[in-house]
Image: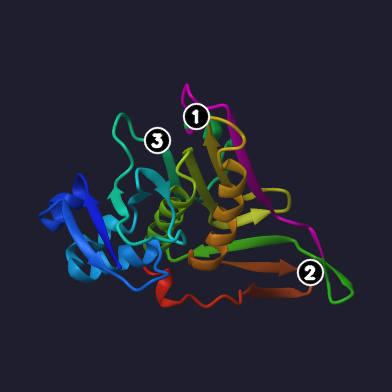
Amino acid sequence: MRVEVLLFATLKDAAGQNRLSVTLPDGATVGDVKRAVMALYPVIEAHIEAAIAAVNQEYAFASDAVHDGDEVAFFPPVSGGSYPEILRLADEPFSADELIAAITIPATGAVCVFSGMVRGETARAGEQLQTEHLEYEAYEPMALAKMRQVAAEIRERWPLVQGIAIVQRVGRLEVGQNTILIACSSGHRDQGCFEAARYGIDRLKEIVPVWKKEVRPDGAAWVEGVYHPTPRDRR
């Protein structure tokens, strides 16, 4: 089957044209169209990965099916004022109220916040473990780049999300202190802010290179995850 692809703004400039036809097998998805365009124009990869998609003039997502004759458009977030984003590593306490205020705009009606805390007690293997404090370490340039990726993935999946804040603490943290905050704002509560905040913390745990050492009365140990990134996790 063949689909017509439209490119706008930065994507159009990178490819050197605004319209092309792509041949795909039956059962192809929007994600397959994106990959086909990248194969034809590798220079467009950095722009199209974060682009918004539409099929027949309606927002679409990577897993959505496309059909013969469909019109598939890719474009950056629409102009008229960029939505606020805060992505940072923090070596001192932060204010959740200040972060929420920073990602709200006059059209915001809902903010969903996930805030991680240092636990003083953890039930594990049938025993109650005590934690004195945590020590967080990050591969900082890559961590910030991957935070940007998480924010871009959120916008791809929930285009009605407005502001995004992802703040990860580093250094020594005492019991009861915030370790991370992820907040997403939207016009209404049913426009993705709940799902986006949940996705943000889960995705951060997968691809953002940050580690913690648990310091207990009987010693200390680094806590390692189990997820191994795949080529699809690259940007």
Up the image or down, 109 lies above or below 28; here it is above
Residue under the image location 45 percent in, 49 percent down? 88
What is the crowding at mark 1: few (fewer than 14 residues within 10 Å), some, or many (at least 20)? many
Which x, y percent locates residue 131? 76, 63
What mark, if any, has residue 1 been given in the picture?
none
Q: Which mark is first along the chain, 3 or 2?
A: 3
| Residue type pointed to by label 1 | Thr
Q: Secondary structure at mark 2?
A: loop
Q: Are marks 2 and 3 in contact (CB under 8 Å)?
A: no
What is the crowding at mark 3: few (fewer than 14 residues within 10 Å), some, or many (at least 20)? some
Q: Magenta includes 111?
A: yes
Q: Nearer the viewer, residue 17 or 57?
A: 57
Up the image or down, 1 lies above or below 151; here it is below
Which x, y percent locates residue 42? 20, 68
Q: Which mark is first along the chain, 3 or 1?
A: 3
Dot 3 corresponds to which residue? 83
Classify residue 160 as left or right of residue 111: left
Q: Which residues are magenta?
A: 103-122
Q: Nearer the viewer, residue 193 or 33?
A: 33
Dot 2 corresponds to which residue? 217
| Residue type pointed to by label 2 | Pro
Up the image or down, 18 lies above or below 37; here it is above
Residue under the image location 41 percent in, 64 percent down? 29
Q: Magenta includes 134?
A: no
What is the spatial separation of the Cα atoms under label 1 and label 3, in whole angstroms? Answer: 9 Å
Classify residue 219 as left or right of residue 190: right
Dot 1 corresponds to which residue? 104
| Residue type pointed to by label 3 | Tyr
Q: Nearer the viewer, residue 59 or 168?
A: 59
What is the spatial separation of the Cα atoms under label 2 and label 1, in whole angstroms? Answer: 42 Å
